[in-house]
Amino acid sequence: MQQTELENTETHKGMMARGLKEAGDDTGLLENTARILDSLVPLRNASHADVVEYRVEIPMRYAECCAILADGRKAKFVEPRKFLGWSGHEKRRSLLFRNHDVTLEVEVDDEAPQHARSTVRSINLQAAIRNNANRLKKFIGIDGELLTLPAL
């Protein structure tokens, strides 16, 4: 494993641990969700905190994910190739992203109540963390709970 890849893995590991610890602070769950998404799958000239809808478009051959902001603008992802795919119905679906060794499943519900500021229902994280002995550990974060699984 190259040094930069190891540093990226350790950075994401620390960032996710901070995000899970901060979930109970005064900034609220929406801000922490946006902070995690902004770190792993950032938008161009926008923040996930301003998103009111996520859209999957198929302009040519490949599907692209974009975000619709509160002011009506469309924001694209900084690295569109991190978007892997989607599943579900038109209004309630899951979006799948990959950033290094971190896979994110973002569950969105476009039929959320009008007073809700975000359509994100939950974020499921799955990561593979390698330590210095090159042993692989996996953990899954589901709605703030952390589950550790031994690598096979």
Image (cartoon, grey):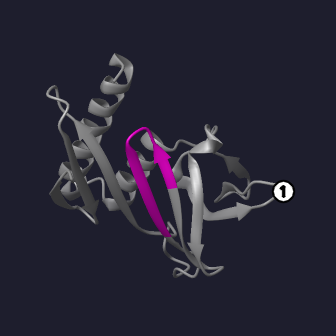
Give the prevailing secondary structure in the magenta stretch.
Answer: strand
Q: Nearer the viewer, residue 17 or 23?
A: 17
In magenta, the rendered stretch is: 97-107
Q: Amino acid at mark 1?
A: Pro
Q: How many marks?
A: 1
Q: Whole-percent x and y of residue 35?
A: 40, 46
Query: Is residue 64 rendered to the left or right of residue 104?
Result: right
Q: Whole-percent x and y of residue 77?
A: 63, 44
**Callout 1 environment at 10 Å: few (<14), some (14 to 19), or many (20+)?**
few
Q: In the rendered view, tell whether residue 124 sits above or below residue 114.
A: above
Residue 102 lies in the magenta stretch: yes
Query: Is residue 49 rendered to the left or right of residue 66?
Result: left
Q: In the rendered view, tell whether residue 102 sits above or below residue 57.
A: above
Q: Whole-percent x and y of residue 2?
A: 36, 19
Residue at 52% across, 80% down? 112
Residue furthest out toward the front: 152
Q: Whole-percent x and y of residue 111?
A: 57, 82
Q: Quadrant of the N terminus?
A: top left
Residue at 43% across, 52% down? 34
Q: In the rendered view, tell whether residue 1 sits above or below residue 60.
A: above
Residue furthest out toward the right: 60
Q: Nearer the viewer, residue 120 or 87?
A: 87
In this figure, which residue is indicated by the disc labeled 1?
A: 59
